[in-house]
Amino acid sequence: MVPRVLMFGWEFPPHSSGGLGTACLGLTRALANEEVEVIFVLPKKINLNANHVKFIFAENGENKLKVQFRAIDSVLQPYLTSNGYIKELDQVTKKTIYGATLIDEVNRYGHQARIIAMNEEFDVIHAHDWLSFCAGVEAKKISGKPLILHFHATEFDRSGGQGANSEVFALEQEAIKYADSIIAVSNFTKNLLVEKYYISPERIEVIHNAIEEPDEMNLPATLEEIKATGTKIVLYLGRITIQKGPDYFIQTAKRVLDIYDGKVLFVVVGSGDMHKQMIDQVAALGISDKVIFTGMLLGEAVTKMFRAADLFVMPSVSEPFGLVPLEAALQNTPSIISKQSGISEVTSHMLKVDFWDIDEMANQIISVLTYGSLQQTLTENAKKEAKKLTWNTPAKKCVALYNKIINKSK
């Protein structure tokens, strides 16, 4: 049986700010290759071009078979916090369609999901992450169709294990009650769901993420000039927030600069609530001339940054999967990744370290920068490994899961 899937998400390339959008694009493309028809629901209208999937926008309860450009009528964004939502709301003309809080807005999306579910034909519901879980639950309530919750991250990941938002945690727990099955992007995430959410392991399917190989492109002149001086570039690329461990990256940079006698530049790409704190930390450590903050980069700029880097470091405190090291590998950039990550389960040719162990992280950085043979071995083998991690396997596992729960629900 080829199932028809009603899929709820919050971002989709090119309008995405993290790994969730990239994962949704890769998965839906691979599902289309399996002849699965995907109806992808987004809470707001954006300009998209993906002919393998049918898009529906939940705003104002409208259903559109074709994607049309229109001004966004929602301030919701992926990775938005409750405080961030209030700040975003203050920047726009307040209309009655907006919820007073982030949770209210999530519930509003859920209400629109009921309308969509009543007007679409589908066999199974697939909801990505907590912002979409309420929509998935409401679609199940109105349709009676089986529901899959796809955890790309939990509230405990997003908070770095410190001060989890009780409202978000409660919403995740409530959605779990209605789920016919749960997808975790790694065993790391599965174990966390079992430990923190008390979910039976039998209810959870581990389906690792994958990667798509990008097109070729040349470095911009400024990066070429930096490389020409013999300067090595160590890269951090991700949200600058507690979950991703940027403070450990800066501490490690200081340790490397105290020991390494070669030319090295640390580049921080991204934005987030810890951005100012990281700049202040760099200044306090006296390494401002050796650390560059670029802000958030997208598309080709990210690819060029990978190709300029001699090494990528992902010091995440809690990383459910972590697509970025695979992106780096496809650009011939070796990686150091934290052991507290899902990607560490499926790779053998990336150096691994506990996020808190800045001494060992510094030793690994210096080793890669010093020994060309090590850098070359990591680069070649990691790229071969990344090329094998295509979205075809996750898609086939999803199709098998769809059919399993559809048949069970009959």
Image (spheres, helix red, strand yellow):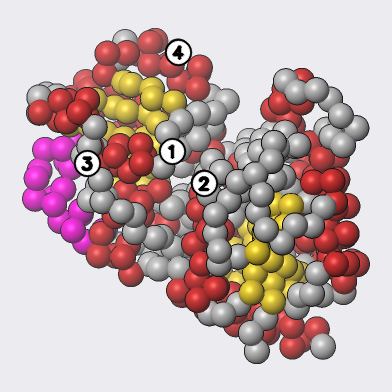
The residue that disc 3 covers is 218
* Distance CA(mark 1)–CA(mark 4): 25 Å
The residue that disc 4 covers is 280
The residue that disc 2 covers is 14
CB under 8 Å between discs 3 and 1: no
CB under 8 Å between discs 1 and 2: yes
* Distance CA(mark 3)–CA(mark 4): 33 Å
Residue 186, horizontal then vertical, whole percent: 52, 62
- Which residue is more in the foreground, 298 or 233? 298
Q: Residue at x 87, y 37 (%)?
A: 97
| Helix, strand or loop status at disc 1 | loop
Give the numbered dot on residue 145.
none
Question: Going by the image, does 254 lie left or right of 314?
Answer: left
Tell me which amino acid carries mark 2.
Pro
Q: Nearer the viewer, mark 1 or mark 4?
A: 1
Q: Earlier in the sequence, mark 2 or mark 3?
A: 2
The segment highlighted magenta reads 361-382
- Which residue is more in the foreground, 83 or 174? 83
* Distance CA(mark 1)–CA(mark 2): 9 Å
Query: Does the segment drawn in magenta span residue 374?
Result: yes
Q: Earlier in the sequence, mark 1 or mark 4?
A: 4
Query: Does the segment drawn in magenta span residue 373?
Result: yes
Tell me which amino acid carries mark 4.
Asp
Q: Residue at x 78, y 40 (%)?
A: 166
- Quadrant (top left/top right/bottom left/bottom right) for the N terminus: bottom right
Q: Is residue 409 visible?
A: yes
Q: Is residue 143 above or below residue 35?
A: above
- Quadrant (top left/top right/bottom left/bottom right) for the C terminus: bottom right
Tell me which amino acid carries mark 3.
Asn
| Helix, strand or loop status at disc 4 | helix
| Helix, strand or loop status at disc 2 | loop
